[in-house]
Image (cartoon, rainbow, N blue to C red):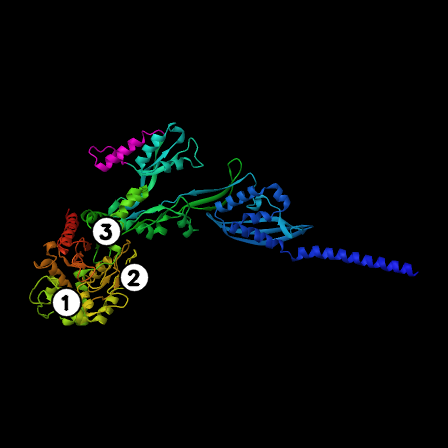
Amino acid sequence: MKKKHKKRVRRGIAGIILVLVLLLVFLWRRDFAVFSPEPETWLKRYYACVATGDYEEMYGILTKDSQSLVGKEAFLKRNQNIYEGIEAKNIRVQVTGEETKKRDHILTYEVRMDTLAGEISFSNQTVFRFDWKERQYKTDWEDSMIFPELTAEDKVKVSTEKAQRGQILDRNGLALADVGTAYTVGLVPGKMNDDSGGDLERLAELLGMSVEAIQKKLDAGWVEEDSFVPLKTISKLTQKEEFMEDPDEEIKHKKEVKEALLTISGVLLSDTEIREYPLGEAGSHLVGYVQQVTAEDLEEHSGEGYDENSVIGKTGVESLYEEELRGQNGCRIYIENADGQVKKVLAEKNKKDGQDISLTIDSSLQKSIYDICQKDKSCTVAMNPHTGEVLALVSTPSYDSNDFILGMSEDKWKALNEDERNPLYNRFRQKLCPGSSFKPIVAAIGLRTGAIDPEKNYETEGLRWQKDAGWGNYYVTTLHEYEPVTLKNAMIYSDNIFFAKAALRIGKENLERELDRLGFGKEIPFEISLAKSQYAGENGIQSEIQLADSGYGQGSVLVNPIHMAALYTGFANEGNVLKPKLLMGDVSEPAIWIPSAYESGHAQRILDAMTQVISSEHGTGHGIYRKDIWLAGKTGTAEIKQNKEDKNGTELGWFGVYTPDSDIEKPILLMTMVEDVKDRGGSGYVVKIAKTILDGWFEDDMQ
C-alpha cells in the first residue's frame, strides 16, 4: 500500500510540475504580447519613419509574408521616391477603430500630411499581428498603405505650373526688371561630328567655358543621342539689332558669336525666358538680380515652395521684395495608372503669379545720372523734396545685372572683383564723411540751442584759427576772408572756422543730443537697409578738436547719403524732415519722419542762406545758378586722411541742391557725392555734375 501511495504522490507531483511548466510557458508567451507596444504604437512608429526618412526601419515593421512579396531594395526606393518626391512632412496619424480576429489586429486610421501641393488626407486600414520570434507587432503591407487607391502598377506623379515672377516698374510703368528672351545654347550628341574635339574647343571658346565643363554635361546619365543638352544662356539679338545697318561693336560681336555657333555640328539655339534688366549698369545697384537657388537657399527656405529650378532674388529690390515678386508655383499630385491615365488627384494648388512692384524711381533720370557719373566713384540720391519720393539711386562705377542672369564668365567676375574702382560696392548704402554739406544741419542746431545769433557779426579770424595754445599745432583752416562774419555769409563762403566755433558754443552734450534726435545712430526708415549715420565712436565726442571739426562735417561725422538728402527736406518743409520713400503709393500727404526737426523760422533762415549759396556770385554753388528756377543748396569737401600730418589723402566732394518751390512742375533734390575730387576742383567738380543732371531734367520738362 505504501508503494502505491508513493507512486500516486510522485505522479501527482509530476502532473503538478507539468501544469506549472505549461502555465509558465503560457504566461511567458502572453507577457510578450501584453507588454509589447500595442499595434497602434507600431502604426505610428511606421509613419514616424517617413518623417525621419528611415525607410529601413519601416521595412522592418513588415510581416515576413509582406517582405517576401516586396524586396527590401524595391520597398526602400518606392517609398523614398514617393514621400520625398511630394515633400511629405508633418504627418499625423489617428486610429479610429480596431477589430481583433484570432491573431489579426485590424486597425482603421486616418492620415494627414503636408505636401508640395497642400494637405493630403485619407482613411485607410491595415492588419497587424504579433511576431513571436521578434517579439513585436508586424503589419501586412501593400502599395495601398501609401495611398489607398495606389497599386503596384501605379505611379505617383507631381506636375508643376511655373508662376510668373512679378515685374519691377518705375513710376511711369516702365520696366526695371521684366521677362526677356535669350538663347539657350545646347548640343544634340547624335548630330555632332564623330571627331568633335576641335568643335568642342571652338564651342568652349565662344561660350567662355572649358572643354571639360562641356564634356561633363554631355556625360550626364540622362543624356541620349537625341537629347538637347543645354550648355549656356546667351543674349539674343532683337529684331532691330538683327537688321541694323550700322551696328556698334557690341551688336557686331553678338552677331559674330551667333553665326559662329551655328557652324558647329550638333549646336542648337533655343529661345528661353529669362529675367531681363533694361537699365543694365544704370540700375543694378538698386534693382539687383536673381540667380538659380543653391542647396543653401533650399535649406534656408524649406517649405516655401522653392525647388531646384527656382530663382531667388540675391541683391537689391529683387531680394528686398522676393516674397511678393516670386509668386507661388501651381502644383498637382496625382496617381497615374499603367495606361498613363490620371487615376486620382491627391492634392492640387493653383498657380499664383508674383506681384508687380512699382517704385518711385524715374528710370530716365536714373539712366541720365549714371551716364553722367559712370567714370567717377560716386553716388547720387534724387528725391522729390516735398513728398520724400526717391527718384533715382545711382552708384558708380557699376556692374550689369544681366551678366548674372546669362552666366558671368570667370574672367569677367575676376575683373569686377579686382577693379580698383570697386564696381560691386554700393555707395549709396554707406556712411561717408560729409564735409561742409553738413553745415546747414549744424546751423539748425546752433539756432535751436541759441549758440548761433543769426544777426551777429562774429568777426573774422583770418584763414586759420585755434581756440587756444592747448591745441598745439592744430588749426582749423578756411579758404575765404569776408565781412561781416554772419551765419548767411558763413554759409555762402563755406567758412569752416565759423562752424567750428559754433560747434564749441553748442557744446558736446547739446550737439550729441540734437544729432541723436535727427536720426544719427538709428535705423533709417527706408525700404533698403542703410548704414547708420554717426557723429563719433562708441564713447561719443572725445575732445574739443573733435567737437570743433564736427561743426563742419569732419571729425568722426559719417552720414549716409539718403539720410543726408532726407535731412535737407526739412529746409523745404518748414522744419519737418520727410521719410524717404521708394514704393509708389498715395503721396497726397507726405510721410514725416522727424516732425519739427528744425524750428520753422530757423528752417526758413537757413533756406535763405542756402539760396544765396547758389544765387550769390561768391557762393560755392553759384555754378549751377539759373534765373528761371529757384534753387538752394550747399557744397562740401571732406578730407580723408590717415592722420593730421597726411599730405597724400583724398577728398570727397559733395553737393546737395533742391527746388524749394513746391509748385514747380518737376521738383527735385539732388545729393551727390564723388570720391577723389582733390586736384579736380573739389566740390566745384560735383557742382558741374549736378548742373548737367539738372539741365537735362528741366530741359525734358520744357520739351
Quarter location, residue 674: bottom left
Residue extending farthest right: 1
Q: Nearer the viewer, residue 22 or 361?
A: 22
Q: Which mark is residue 473?
A: 1
- From where the camera sits, is residue 523 visible? yes
At label 1, which amino acid type do we have? Asn
Numbered badge on residue 656: none
Mark 1–mark 2 CB contact (< 8 Å): no
- Image location (x, y in percent) of residue 700: 16, 47
The residue closer to the viewer here, 688 or 23, is: 23
Q: Is residue 497 left or right of residue 306?
A: left
**SS type, badge 1:** loop
Residue 668 seen in the current view: no
Say which label, 1 or 2, has the lower sequence index.
1
Residue numbers of the magenta segment: 237-265
Marks 3 and 1, the one that precedes in the sequence: 3
Label 3 to label 1: alpha-carbon separation: 40 Å
Q: Is residue 537 above or below residue 658?
A: below
**The residue tagged with tag 2: helix, strand or loop?**
loop
The quarter holding residue 496 reads: bottom left
Query: Can you give x and y, in whole percent of width and height, for residue 549 in the image?
Result: 18, 65
Instruction: Please name whichever residue, 370 or 173, is drawn nearer the observer in this view of the structure.
Output: 370
Circle on res. 523 = 2
Q: Quadrant of the N terminus?
A: bottom right
> Where is residue 531 shown, x and y percent of the image?
28, 59
Quarter of the image holding residue 567? Answer: bottom left
